[in-house]
Amino acid sequence: MRTVAWLLAVAMALGVAGCRKAAEPCVVTGVTVEEDPGPFRMDATGIDREDLRRIAVDAFARTSGFEVPSGEVRKGANRCRGLVSLLDARVGPKGGGAQVEVLLRMDVMPGDDADPVSETVRATEQVAPGEARAASFRRAIQGGASRAASALALALAEARKPDAEVIRDLEASDPRLRELAVGVLADRKNPAAVPGLVARLQDPDPDVADRAVGALAQIGDPRGVGPIIALSRRREGPFVAEMVRAIGDIGGPEAEAYLDTLAAGHPDPLVSEAAREALRDARRRRASGQGAGRTVGGAR
């Protein structure tokens, strides 16, 4: 009987899971090319604006989480628009030959009032013997567009998750997912995320740790002050100055006492000046009853 009951429970669980509605793909209704007014000319790569647009469209079409319609967009579809920009392109020596390198940015602008999501990638390709550089540039741009589209799909999927799932993603094995989770939680300012964000201050990826500092500053919960102070004591120079500003943004007695100490006697003028400014701002906010609100540490 126990075996039968267990099998029934498993069957019911699988049935519920099977009934869950899959996330709607983002239907890309168009892609715009934005040519950056940088020091290089796009035509030097052998890729024109229409080539670049088609490469971006193809990258979206091949990426799970996006859909590029072949005809009229169905009613009620989750629409979005794409944007692609070739920020830089150059050729350099590599192993006795040549290598092309491109810097590509792709954006997705959701159809609702959500903020656009952006991803910038750098891609390189070796120029094969006898190969035209235009072919190498095309491969590099295609590879970069594919990586950017995948990152954008991951970011959009993370933004659709409820807070509890995003908080769990702070422990994900993929640093990209941890970083995205930090950014989403920073925007939502849910105090329930503070313990998980504090844990990310020890993240093996320094970018994730820096973004966690900014997220704690945006949330403005006093529980973040002590751990950021501890982290600042293991950093130097500009990194400490950014953490000092984050501590000031959170504010409170512990923050003000620490800032007062740094302002009075830190050996690095950059840090002591940042502490004085942060302390002044924290006291001004306290006097006016305002909370934290500045974005620091790379939080998005």
Image: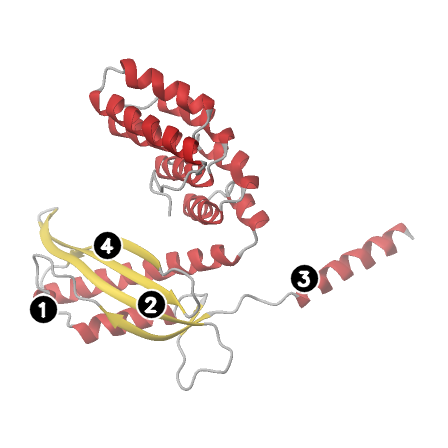
3 left or right of 240 in image: right
Q: Is residue 228 visible?
A: yes
Q: Position of residue 57 (x, y in %)?
A: 31, 72
Question: Distance from label 2 to label 3 (Cα)?
Answer: 30 Å
Residue identified by numbered label 4: 123
Going from the N terminus, do you reach mark 3 or mark 4 first?
A: 3
Residue identified by numbered label 2: 59
Question: Distance from label 2 to label 1 (Cα)?
Answer: 21 Å
Mark 3, other Cα within 10 Å: few <14 / some 14–19 / many ≥20: few
Going from the N terminus, do you reach mark 2 or mark 1 first?
A: 1
Q: Secondary structure at mark 3?
A: helix
Decide: marks 2, 4 in contact (CB < 8 A)?
no
**Residue at the extreme front of the image, as rendered:** 288
Question: Distance from label 1 to label 4 (Cα)?
Answer: 18 Å
**Amino acid type assigned to the residue bearing label 4 in the image:** Ala
Q: Secondary structure at mark 1?
A: helix
Q: Where is 107 relative to 256, above or below?
A: below
Q: Residue at x 44, y 59 (%)?
A: 156
Q: Position of residue 196 (x, y in %)?
A: 53, 37
Mark 2, other Cα within 10 Å: few <14 / some 14–19 / many ≥20: many
Residue identified by numbered label 1: 43
Going from the N terminus, do you reach mark 3 or mark 1 first?
A: 3
Residue identified by numbered label 3: 17
**Residue at the extreme bottom of the image, as rendered:** 72
Quarter-wise, where is residue 73 in the image? bottom left
Q: Residue at x 32, y 24 (%)?
A: 235
Decide: marks 2, 1 in contact (CB < 8 A)?
no
**Amino acid type assigned to the residue bearing label 2 in the image:** Ala
